[in-house]
Image (cartoon, rainbow, N blue to C red):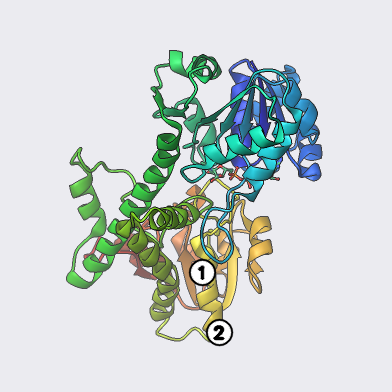
Amino acid sequence: MRITMIGAGYVGLVSGACFSDFGHDVTCVDLDQKKIERLERGQIPIYEPGLETLVAENAKAGRLSFTTDLASAVSGADVVFIAVGTPSRRGDGHADLSFVHAAAADIAKALDGFTVIVTKSTVPVGTGDDVERIIAQTRPDADFVVVSNPEFLREGAAIEDFKRPDRIVVGLEDQRARPVMEEVYRPLYLNQSPLMFTGRRTAELIKYAANGFLAMKITFINEMADLCEKAGGDVQAVARGIGLDNRIGSKFLNAGPGYGGSCFPKDTLALVKTGQDFDAPLRLIETTVAVNDHRKRAMGRKVISACGGDVRGKTIGILGLTFKPNTDDMRDAPSIAIIQALRDAGAIVRAYDPEGMEAAKTVLEGVQYAKDAYDAANGADCLVLVTEWNQFRSLDLKRVKQAMTAPVLVDLRNVYRRHEVEAAGLSYVSVGRAQDV
Ligand code: NAD
């Protein structure tokens, strides 16, 4: 199969590399010339475990190549995936489809022979119809089918997720695409990953329903954490107590500073807008969005209160900036709102992240960057664990205490236990754990 991937970002690059690893002949296209030049030199523009090796091996085998020339990459392809960004539209929170629409128009001009065009980007219900219309208007003679194939990979575990998905969802209206998509995913299909065929609109809705539900689950346990703190409970035990019930499941029940990242914030917002447009409001998701927005700044206030109610002129050390470990992605990371709240209150912020500091510099102002966790603790009046990178899980707490001006640890990921932190001479604040754990 000759596959062309439009957009070589977190999803496009991982999917393209994995498809080439399945044995397909893949060309990744991106508008960003610098990104393509780096990829051609074997440099990976993002941090994703295992990706560098996967790209290098498949590029060397001649199955994976990179270009900015969309037309030549599309004209020879059997399948063209659209994996461009769909950020929130400024002002109203709808998904901004301008990149998808532009890609569709560019693809249309270059089509040659029967081609299956697949939207992998997360797009609101009905976008497949738009893509089909744009292509048909641009090239009335083109022979093509538009399919929806949403992606469910998680950054930080993207390759494993792509190669061992819980399911593959393929939404189509024209059965000619079915054998083509079966062939694209054959290695996974043989591996018994369920390949689920639905209508195109249903597939588009499945992606938003999944992200909406997961965001709601996180938000639920976060509110339970607040109740545990006030009523005297331990949210981790509550999470385990409900998670062992198979109807609920144990995943996505870790209380923390609120969800962030490149998907949940924008996708929940877009789902709310879609519901309103169709006069079918999704009130649970509306509330999820509101509760989560409030929570991120509330975490800043939690730190301030751990510092005695005033942080003006105080130094706050921050451990972890990315929205989760094992990525360099800073999009909508909770650290941004937390740091903003601390800076608004007059704090000096000193942060360290293993992979996210370059990206952080483009979205955070006035932050000092440390060279490691102990350097972030150096001279700090409070140390806040925001992202649970592995290297923050087993800190030498005595060394941390010695480095700090005032020994306060705020653990927003519940990585530590109170007694071990207090034994090292630090005071300890965590999330949703009123009881001594
Ligand atoms: P990204 O911003 O990392 O990558 C998008 C890339 O597309 C960029 O490199 C950009 O230069 C390129 N691009 C934009 N318009 C183009 C065009 N016309 N031609 C060629 N290249 C073009 O975004 P991402 O995180 O990979 O997300 C892509 C889509 O996948 C989004 O819809 C997102 O919601 C969805 N998604 C993301 C994840 C994730 O974990 N990041 C998971 C599942 C789904």
Give the image quarter of residue 169.
Answer: top left
- From the viewer's perspective, tell me whether residue 193 is left or right of residue 90: left
Instruction: Work out which quarter of the rendered image holds the N terminus and state it.
Output: top right
Along the line of sight, the residue nearer the viewer: 413 or 206: 206
Name the residue carrying label 2: 346
- From the viewer's perspective, tell me whether residue 13 is left or right of residue 380: right
Disc 2 or 1, which lies upstream in sequence? 1
Asked whether residue 401 appears in the rendered view, the answer is no
Vertical placement of 275 versus 363: above or below?
above
Q: Position of residue 407 (x, y in %)?
A: 44, 74
- Ligand 1 is found in the corner quadrant, namely top right
Mark 1 neighbour class, 10 Å CA radius: few under 14, some 14 to 19, many 20 or more? many
Name the residue carrying label 1: 337
Q: Position of residue 202 (x, y in %)?
A: 40, 36
Amino acid type at circle 2 is Gly
- From the viewer's perspective, tell me whether residue 289 is left or right of residue 29: left
